[in-house]
Amino acid sequence: MPAIAASTSANSDAVTAARAARRPWASIAIETDIAALADIWRAFEASALVTPYQSYDWVRHFAETIGAAHDMTFRYALVHDATGTLCALLPLVVTGRSGFRFAEFIGGKHANYHMGLYAPGFAARLDAALTAQMLTEIGSAIGGLDALAFVNQPVNWQGVTNPAAQLAAGPSPSRAYKLALIAGDGDATLRRSMSSHARKKLKNKHSRFKDFGPSTLVRAATPEEITRIIDAFLSQKAERFRSMGVPDPFAEPAMRAFLERAAIACGSARPAIELYSLDLAGRSVATYVGTIQGERFSGMATSFDMASETVKTSPGELLLAELIRLKAREGVAVFDLGVGEARYKTTFCDDHDDLVDSFLPLTFKGRVFARIARTKRDLKRRIKRSPMALKLAQRASGWLRSRRSEEE
């Protein structure tokens, strides 16, 4: 028995040594102060694989407004190689729910894409086994976690495999829709991405819209414009959700604070989010909220004035078409409309990003959590694939929420 034990121990040591030799990182540090990471983070995102929702300014504004309002616990994992060079940065929030404690990417439903920041060469070296090892070490460094839960992750980003997507439990319930922009020519982009029937309908809507008078596309640049467009956006959203009979996720004061702070440019840097309005006689009939990183513009939310006489001309779609033209002129390469199914997304977009969900257990409880999470996501995906089931689920959800409100 001692000989067998010694042999087993030697094999285990050999496996550990082999893994250590393969891994392209040397250390992992967990930070809690995002302000102290400003210079490091901004310098890294300039060359890293990063979605607009993991840029420093987007995360910082979210953390200081919505995060602070909900007393969220943030942890920032920094992965370095043997030379001390930053290779990856994962902005995480620690969540406790139903007796489980897990970490997920910051932003929740307000972020369409959930992914870490990776140096491209580093990401290319991570296979599924190394990724699992790195994430397990990050979980251990944070401490007290049962699992890591990464949802709505792009499978690829800028042509490079997203490391954590290799651990996917399965596809996300929804995909994300996008279109590549033809530099300097938004009209050519729309001719390529939209069907001739859809373009004809859009042209007819635009002709009817012009009958109401001259309109203007406004990008919020001054404090007054930011306040006015946020007022319009929140009012339009409130009316929309009221008509649907469901709670308004934009109603909390922290959401207004997030939009206000993130829409203000800091020095020479552009703002973390951009606010747009389609104005008719000085009144907003549609709004659009987006965020930009590198050559990609990502739509966060859109709204329209349900009480406006222009509603039958689909002002939200007209605003989107104008934005596509604007971003093509500005040299943006990719315009995405975010996660989730909607008719207007498939009308305008001729491409999509496949998204996956990963649940990495770190404890026995974590294995239970991962099993439950996978089952819930599979059920949600099936419901979204069935129009009838989706309608019934929405009605049931609205009824349950109204019952809770009455009881409160």
Image (cartoon, helix red, strand yellow):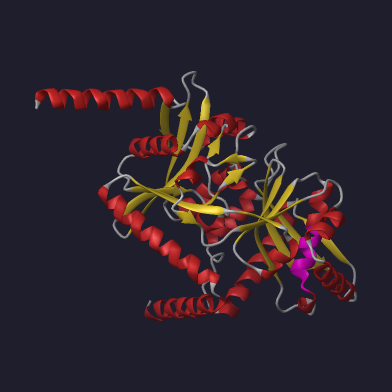
> In the image, what residue occupies the spot 59% across and 44% down?
156
**Rendering coords of residue 331 (x, y %):** 80, 44
Give the residue drawn at x 78%, y 57%. 323
Residue 11 position within the rendered picture, expressed as x and y whole percent measured from the top left: 26, 25
Residue 158's quadrant in the figure?
Answer: top right
Query: Between 149 and 105, which is closer to the camera in this rendering?
Result: 149
The image shows a total of numbered marks equal to 0
Residue nearest the observer in this picture, 90 or 128: 128
Q: Position of residue 154 (x, y in %)?
A: 57, 49
On screen, residue 13 above or below 239: above
Quarter of the figure that contains the C terminus:
bottom left
Among the 4 quarters of the image, the one containing residue 201:
bottom right
Residue 240 magenta-highlighted: no
Asked if the magenta segment contains residue 318, the reply would be yes
Question: Which segment is the magenta one?
Answer: 314-323
Residue 337 seen in render: no
Residue 379 appears in the figure:
yes
Q: Is residue 243 above or below residue 44?
A: below
Determine the residue located farthest toward the top in the rendered image: 83
The kind of secondary structure the magenta stretch mainly shows is: helix
**Residue 301: horizontal and vertical position, in percent?**
64, 61
Q: Residue at x 85, y 62 (%)?
A: 216
- Is residue 334 left or right of 37 when viewed as pictured? right
The answer to which of 183 and 286 lies nearer the viewer is: 183
Please identify the quarter of the rendering in which residue 42 is found.
top right
Residue 160 against residue 286 in the figure, above or below: above
Q: Which quarter of the rendering shows the N terminus?
A: top left
